[in-house]
Image (cartoon, helix red, strand yellow):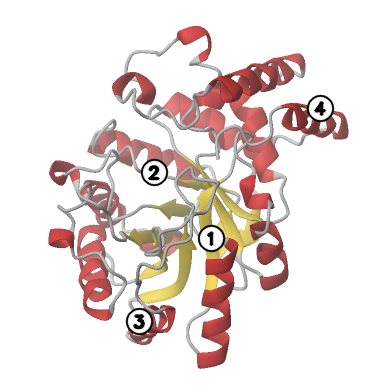
Amino acid sequence: MEYRNIGSSDLRASIIGLGSMTWGEQNSEAEGHEQLDYALAHGVNLIDTAELYAVPPRAATYGRTEEIIGSWLEQRGNRDQVILASKIAGPGVGWIDHIRNGQTRYIGEQIRSALEGSLRRLRSDYLDLYQLHWPERNTNFFGRLGYTPDEAPFTPIVETLTALQREVTAGKIRYIGLSNETAWGAMKFLQIAEAMDLPRIISIQNPYSLLNRSYEVGLAEVSHREQVGLLAYSPLGFGVLTGKYLNGEAPTGSRLQRFPDYTRYSNPQAVAATKRYVELARDHQLTPAQLALAYINSRPFLASNLVGATTLQQLTENISSAEVTLSDEMLEEIETIHTLYPNPSP
């Protein structure tokens, strides 16, 4: 397993990180513990979660994923062996009113409330990384490429960073990061932190996959020049890049079979691109998942590639991608496909 620093921090994360959003919905507590045991035994040391999880978000499962991780940490007594990352939910319209009674702004009292709830569920005194799950601003994230100007007010970034600084000073957070963020947002957080001597972001957790390489436009340079690592989520595009949904298939129990409205990576262009990537993988004796994940692993701006799985077999295959090196020929073929189908699923 390869390890990389997360941005400018001293956190050395495995190149494969473990996502957790299915635990408490598609996976039981026992299955979550089994995945955690396997991942740790195979060199994975970064565990990423969020107060929002399990997904899809609903009141009945709010915080359940953190509880599953917390019971594992308590039973195994291995908190010092992992990098533990979580996220505070931002504002929503109706769909997350169950989270803190809809009080989800990035202000001091709400940050404190969310953080204390996460620490309680995780049964930990501190988080290694605490992330803002999405911007308060109305901007282009969660699958939107176009930007529509909007003058709606949002919490001043200096206020958010000052509130986070209090928690860092209290020893409850080691480092902070962003998620679903834009290049403008990342640079403003960096600019204000430097000017006001406030905590500096070390990571951006955004979608990045063969079907969505929009991170490369703007944010990759931010990662490189500002030492802010990418934590890549949805590297398999909701499992689409495994090829299991081709030809109209939807395996029983799979995410898209259970939640058919999750269509972000299932438009005709994405399906056509996926067919080509699946063929390329098989031509080179790799599984489609190994190809898709190995490409993400090869990017110099990546800190960790967050994989999720509902079965141990899937997790085994995903972690094995850390041992795969793509040849120059394969990388060129990937670029050929990308030129034909550029970012079909932003």
Rendering quarter of residue 3: bottom right
Q: Is residue 110 left or right of residue 143?
A: left
Q: Earlier in the sequence, mark 1 or mark 2?
A: 2
Q: Amino acid at mark 3?
A: Gly
Rounded to the nearest angstrom, the CA distance separating label 1 from label 2 is 23 Å
Q: Amino acid at mark 1?
A: Ile
Q: Amino acid at mark 4?
A: Glu
Q: Could you say where residue 331 lies in the image, as x and y percent from the top left?
A: 80, 34
* Disc marking residue 333: 4
Q: Of circles 1 and 2, which is in front?
A: 1
Q: Residue at x 20, y 71 (%)?
A: 113
Q: Earlier in the sequence, mark 3 or mark 1?
A: 3
Q: Of circles 2 and 4, which is in front?
A: 4
Q: Earlier in the sequence, mark 1 or mark 4?
A: 1
Q: Which residue is mark 3?
A: 171
Q: Which residue is mark 1?
A: 204
* Disc marking residue 36: 2
Rounded to the nearest angstrom, the CA distance separating label 3 from label 2 is 25 Å
